[in-house]
Image (cartoon, rainbow, N blue to C red):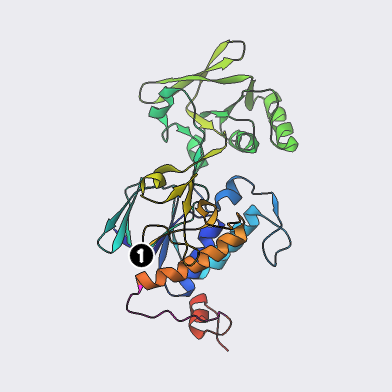
């Protein structure tokens, strides 16, 4: 069991900045996110799209914003639990007991939900037979590309992720690239590279095909793909990768007894606390009169929620507000030498 002053659910910009705010006031925190990397919507939906409404930063991409927020957290050595979903939450005397789908348990007086409009989950293959091979031979993201070396990999999708990985894995693997349309949505330069690799025999390209079924006895052996004219091809495959984008699910949050309103959580505007004491909601998932779904609003909400956490985490101490420009204690936490 992991004991902490606060558990943040969501490693997007709002969650990352809230972790910073918790640490500079002397509280410990852990961060859980369903995705396999930090950044939330900024990384998954628009990593290269310009953002123009971050104060004092005229323009940055989602990837650059995430990197800067992670750099800001470096002095604190915060523990990230990525690729994990919070499944259970229940009150244990004065603390909340929080369990993830990977079997981890956290004990904390404060839970901060910073999960955007829910958790991101990959769009999965529809054939029921795929379930038995998921996380073994069928994946929706890549954590270790070395497992594909010398194998036959069938990649489904028509966007940048599918094209980029087809090019990358073709260096050491036999690659089948399958898309349900003739047109691809990825960068033209990458698509040109795919066609070049197709001509050299490094990539087999199948368009207007979709996955029909997967075959194997315990271990994936082959797949059947179906053309729009109903023609079926069987392809030997050791691994299958699906890159169909993400869907946002409210998920287990719906069962936590929170005051929900159209898939958002009602909060007060003093502490951004929900109807459950010690549970806060910030960022796109929270709702209150005058709510603006902006990243800078999430930063404000996280700063107030972090300070509300102090009372429950340190009931015998009084919180004293200090400016980071003048506080010797805060400077020490940040690793900054005092004058």
How many marks are shown on the rendered structure? 1
The percent position of residue 333, horizontal first and vertical second, equals 48, 77
Q: Which of 243 and 25 is in front in this view?
A: 25
221 is higher (above) or lower (below) than 19: above
Q: Is residue 41 above or below residue 335?
A: above
- Quadrant of the drawing holding the N terminus: bottom left
| Residue at screen point 54% across, 39% down | 246
Quarter of image, res 179: top right
List the residue tagged with mark 1: 4
Q: Position of residue 223 (x, y in %)?
A: 49, 20
Identify the element where label 1 is drawn: loop
Lateral position of residue 218 relative to residue 179, left or right: left
- In this rendering, the answer to whether 240 lies above or below 304 is above
Quarter assignment of residue 167: top right
Single out the residue that lies furthest toward the bottom: 339
> Between residues 126 and 319, which one lies in front from this camera angle?
319
Q: Residue at point 46% right, 68% down?
A: 306
On whether residue 315 falls in the magenta region, the answer is: yes
Residue 287 belongs to the span the image colors magenta: no
What predominant SS class does the magenta segment belong to? loop
Residues shaded magenta: 314-324
Instruction: Give whichever of 25, 201 is nearer the camera.
Output: 25
Q: Residue furthest left?
A: 93
Q: In which quarter of the image is the C terminus?
A: bottom right
Say which of 223 and 14 sits in front.
14
- Classed neighbour count for the residue bearing mark 1: other residues with Cα under 10 Å, few (<14), some (14–19), many (≥20): some
Q: Residue 287, percent across and down?
A: 52, 54
């Amino acid at each position: 069991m992991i004991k902490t002053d606060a558990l943040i659910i969501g490693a997007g910009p709002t969650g990352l900045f809230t972790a910073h705010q918790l640490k500079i006031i002397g509280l410990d925190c852990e961060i859980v996110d369903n995705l396999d990397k930090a950044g939330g919507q900024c990384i998954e939906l628009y990593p290269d799209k310009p953002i123009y409404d971050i104060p004092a930063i005229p323009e940055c991409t989602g990837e650059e914003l995430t990197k800067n927020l992670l750099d800001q957290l470096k002095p604190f050595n915060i523990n990230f639990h990525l690729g994990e979903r919070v499944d259970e939450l229940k009150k244990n005397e004065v603390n909340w007991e929080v369990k993830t789908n990977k079997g981890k348990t956290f004990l904390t007086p404060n839970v901060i939900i910073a999960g955007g409009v829910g958790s991101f989950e990959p769009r999965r293959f529809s054939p029921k037979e795929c379930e038995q091979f998921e996380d073994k031979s069928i994946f929706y993201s890549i954590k270790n590309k070395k497992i594909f070396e010398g194998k036959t990999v069938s990649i489904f999708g028509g966007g940048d992720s599918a094209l980029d990985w087809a090019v990358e894995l073709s260096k050491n693997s036999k690659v089948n690239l399958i898309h349900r349309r003739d047109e691809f949505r990825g960068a033209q330069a990458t698509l040109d590279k795919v066609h070049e690799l197709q001509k050299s025999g490094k990539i087999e390209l199948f368009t207007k095909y979709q996955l029909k079924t997967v075959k194997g006895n315990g271990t994936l052996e082959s797949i059947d793909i179906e053309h729009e004219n109903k023609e079926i091809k069987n392809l030997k495959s050791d691994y299958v990768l699906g890159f169909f984008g993400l869907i946002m699910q409210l998920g287990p949050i719906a069962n936590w007894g929170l005051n929900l309103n159209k898939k958002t959580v009602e909060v007060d505007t003093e502490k951004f606390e929900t109807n459950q004491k010690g549970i806060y909601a910030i960022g796109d998932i929270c709702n209150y009169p005058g709510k603006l779904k902006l990243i800078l609003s999430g930063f404000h909400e996280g700063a107030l929620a972090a300070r509300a956490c102090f009372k429950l985490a340190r009931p015998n101490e009084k919180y004293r507000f200090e400016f980071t420009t003048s506080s010797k204690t805060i400077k020490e936490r940040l690793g900054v030498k005092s004058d």
